[in-house]
Amino acid sequence: MSEQGSITVVASSVVAVVVVMAAGLGAAGQLVAGWSQTATAADAAALAAAPATFLGSPVEEAFRIAAANGSRLISCMCPVDRSFATRTVEVRTETRVQIPVLGDVAIRATSRAEFDPMAGLQD
């Protein structure tokens, strides 16, 4: 009985496992990068919208900043408030990422920011 072809089967199996693992790591890397981008966009949009609640258009500001960071604004709970009360805004963003095998994946993030109009006046 000859074992001449057995090394080819083992080598092919090892190569297949390495290829599958590489694809999985690549997909995981793309998911992490997409999550990071989406979270950054949400944070930036919330930070931009919070002071715009005092004098400005917070939803437009959140939309602009989310888009500049490669994300889409899903919602902005940031009502205009001309009082000197401290307020918190909440922003949700979404980024779509193409992942091999999984296809088009939506990654969402939520961020909150607080704005105190009196903070700059207390120095």
Image (cartoon, rainbow, N blue to C red):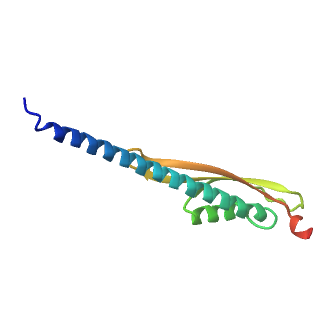
Residue 29 locus on image (x, y percent): 46, 52
Where residue 100 appears, x then y in whole percent?
38, 49
Residue at image location 32% in from the left, 46% down from the top: 18
- Identify the residue at the far right of this view: 122
Q: Is residue 34 left or right of residue 58?
A: left
- What residue sits 87% from the left and 69% below the top? 120
Tally the numbered discs.
Answer: 0
Q: Nearer the viewer, residue 53 or 14?
A: 14
Question: Is 79 on the left or on the right of 91, as rendered?
Answer: right
**In the displayed structure image, the side of residue 8 where residue 33 appears, left or right:** right
Is 109 above or below relative to 49? above
Question: Which quadrant would the N terminus be assigned to in this image?
Answer: top left
Q: Quadrant of residue 44?
A: bottom right
- Residue at x 71%, y 64% (from the top left corner): 48
Choose between 113 and 13: the one closer to the eye.
13
Q: Quadrant of the C terminus?
A: bottom right
Depth check, front residue: 32 or 99: 32
